[in-house]
Amino acid sequence: MTVHQTDIAVIGAGPVGLFAVFEAGMLGLRCHVLDALGAVGGQCVALYPEKPIYDIPGYPEVEAQALIDRLAEQAAPFEPVYHLGHAVTGLEPADGNRWRVTNADGTVVDAGAVIIAAGVGAFGPHRPPLDGLEAYEGSSVFYLVDRREAFRDKRVVIAGGGDSAVDWAISLTEVAASVAVVHRRDKFRAAPESERRLRALAAEGKIEMVVPYQLAGFEGNGGQLEAVIVQTLKGDRRSVPADVLLPFFGLSMDLGPIAEWGLALENKHIAVDQATCATNRSGLFAIGDIATYPGKLKLILTGFSEAAMAAHAIHPLLRPDEVLRFEYSTTKGVPG
């Protein structure tokens, strides 16, 4: 069995985990990164590689895959070692106040500190409780968008009122034959600017707003949708023509082995100190969507900040005799 020695083990290779590699590298700390998925990117790549993201500084709009590509490029000068395609199965204390991280293929990483950047843990879609749903899944009902082109000239019905539903409704107007949005009320949970764009497109006739309605059933044959049946709370029903249904009701969350690591948990999230992202166990830190503290905003931007704070909190633990003088990247540069 090979045991890899490193400064920091980063569990999770999503955008926040990748940026943690950069921030650690700027402080002279090496990282090994572990992820169950076969490629870096986390949810951004697994669930919506072509989804436009609007709230990354410096990018008025950037597709999720493009953001991951740039973050991996940014981390590359610090030569992170990736262990991908196998879930982390164990985390236990090691000699010298270190930690041993083990994944499903037996890889062991011995690290001075661990940053848990596992997003929402193991995830899967919340499926609408509709009879006959399984017959359409994978052919007419999809819970993510791999490629926008797959929906070109299709009649698309999107159900939900959050960011994913609104952002994809806006984006798919550029390729779909029609786009309808089904939501139980005329108020959305998406970013205000995204909702403004949605309503503007609806006013232009490019999006049909089916509110206040909920999904009630299907019309179709052999797994191919012809229409989606919707109804109001009063029982009024109507049929919305559809080739494709995209239900965006969020993700179900399963912490998996993380729940067994002795961490303080709050509603399936890891409680951390807001200033350092330290957990209740020395040497373990959590950042990104899996971390929680009062006032937490679940934004990629927040996770980037947490990555920097965790790296700076870890440095004195691993280099107690080394004085860390904070310098801006414009001053110290990045290894070439």
Image (cartoon, rainbow, N blue to C red):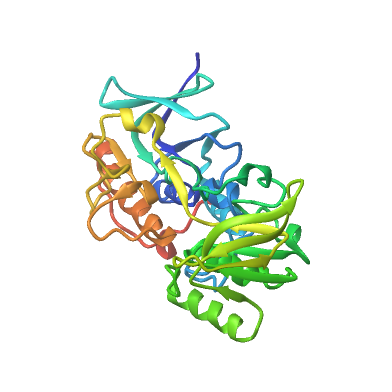
Residue 107 percent location from the top left of the image: 50, 22
Q: Going by the image, does 287 lie left or right of 217?
A: left
How many dots with numbers? 0
Q: Position of residue 283 (x, y in %)?
A: 27, 35
Indicate whether 231 appears above or below 311. below
Comparing 41 with 223, the one in front is 223
21 over 93 or under it: above or below: below
**Residue at image point 64% right, 51% down:** 142
Judge whether residue 336 can be spotted in this image.
no
Is residue 107 left or right of 24 when viewed as pictured?
right
Q: Is residue 254 left or right of residue 237?
A: left
Rendered image quadrant of residue 154: bottom right
Q: Position of residue 93 (x, y in %)?
A: 29, 23
- Percent across and percent down for residue 230 are 57, 63
Kindly indicate the quadrant of the structure image that contains residue 168: bottom right
Q: Residue at x 57, y 75 (%)?
A: 209
At 55% from the left and 77% from the top, the residue drawn is 198
User: Could one spot residue 311 in this view of the protein?
Assistant: yes
Q: Residue at x 49, y 67 (%)?
A: 232
The reply, left or right, for residue 225 in relation to residue 59 is right
Q: Residue furthest front?
A: 235
- Frontmost residue, 215 versus 97: 215
Relative depth, front residue between 17 and 128:
128
User: Residue farthest to the top?
Assistant: 1
Residue furthest bottom as drawn: 204
